[in-house]
Amino acid sequence: MSATKKPRADSVLKTLPPERQAQIADYARDHSLKDTRAWLALDSLTTSEASLSEWLSWHSLQRQLRRNESTVGTLLEKLQVSRPDWTAAQIQSVGQSFFTALALEQQDPKQWLMIQQTSLKRDQLALDKNKFEFDATRAALAKLPQLKAISANSKLTEDQKLEQARLELFGVTPA
C-alpha cells in the first residue's frame, strides 16, 4: 500500500486513532510480534503476526514522512528568509538534494530510485517543452506579422532570431 493513501476501512490497525496507534507501536518496540498480538487480543483486536509486522512498517513510515514534511517546511522557511531572490528551480534543486541525501542516509534504494526517476521525468518534460517552443518558433518566424521584423533583421544570428521570436511568442526565454 502506498504510504500516502487513505487506509482501507476494514484495516483494523490503520483505522485506529493516532494515540492508540502510537501506544501499539511503543509496546511493539519492547515486545515480540507474538506478545504484541496477544496484548492486542486483550482489547479484542485480532490480527495476524504478518499483518502486525506490515502495520508496524507502515506506521514507522508514516512517522518518518511526518518528520520529513516538518523538516522540509522548516528548510523552505529558512530558504525564503535567507535566499528571497532564489528561483523556483533553485529551491527545487535544494529539495531534490535533501530527499536524495535522506534516501541514501536511510539506505532506501526504492526511495532513491523514485526520486531519480521523478527528476528524470521533470528534465524530460522541460526538454520536450523547449523542443516544442523551438519548433513552433521556427515555424512561425516568417509567417506571423509580429515576427517578420525579427526575421528580417540581418544584424541577428539565427539563434538570436529564434530566441527573440520565442520570447515574443511564449513570453519566456529558454531554460
Image (cartoon, rainbow, N blue to C red):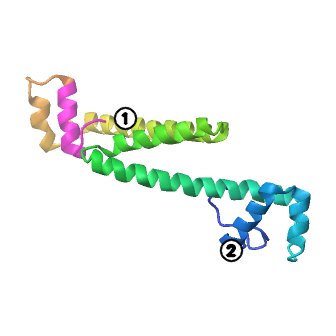
State how far apart marks 2 and 1 are (Cα): 51 Å
Residue 51, x across and y down, in percent: 84, 60
Q: Is residue 48 visible?
A: no
Residue 159, x across and y down, in percent: 22, 25
Residue 43 magenta-highlighted: no
Segment tinted magenta in the rendering: 159-175
Which residue is drawn at the image coordinates 80% and 59% (left, top)?
28
Residue 108, x across and y down, in percent: 66, 39
Q: Nearer the viewer, mark 2 or mark 1?
A: 2
Q: Check the picture and name the quadrant holding the N terminus.
A: bottom right
Give the side of residue 50 with respect to residue 153, left or right: right
Residue 75 lies, with reference to residue 34, above or below; the image says above
- Secondary structure beneath disc 1? helix
* Residue 27 image label: none
Check disc 1 and give the amino acid type. Answer: Lys
Which residue is drawn at the image coordinates 30% and 44% (left, top)?
87
- Secondary structure beneath disc 2? loop
| Residue at image mark 1 | 131
Which residue is drawn at the image coordinates 30% and 39% (left, top)?
136
Give the side of residue 12 with respect to residue 64, left or right: right
Residue 96 lies, with reference to residue 43, above or below; the image says above
Residue 171 magenta-highlighted: yes
| Residue at image mark 2 | 17
Pick whichever, 81 or 100, lies toward us: 81
Pick whichever, 37 or 142, lies toward us: 37
Which residue is drawn at the image coordinates 32% and 35% (left, top)?
135
Check disc 2 and give the amino acid type. Answer: Pro
Residue 165, x across and y down, in percent: 19, 37
Pick whichever, 153 or 95, lies toward us: 95
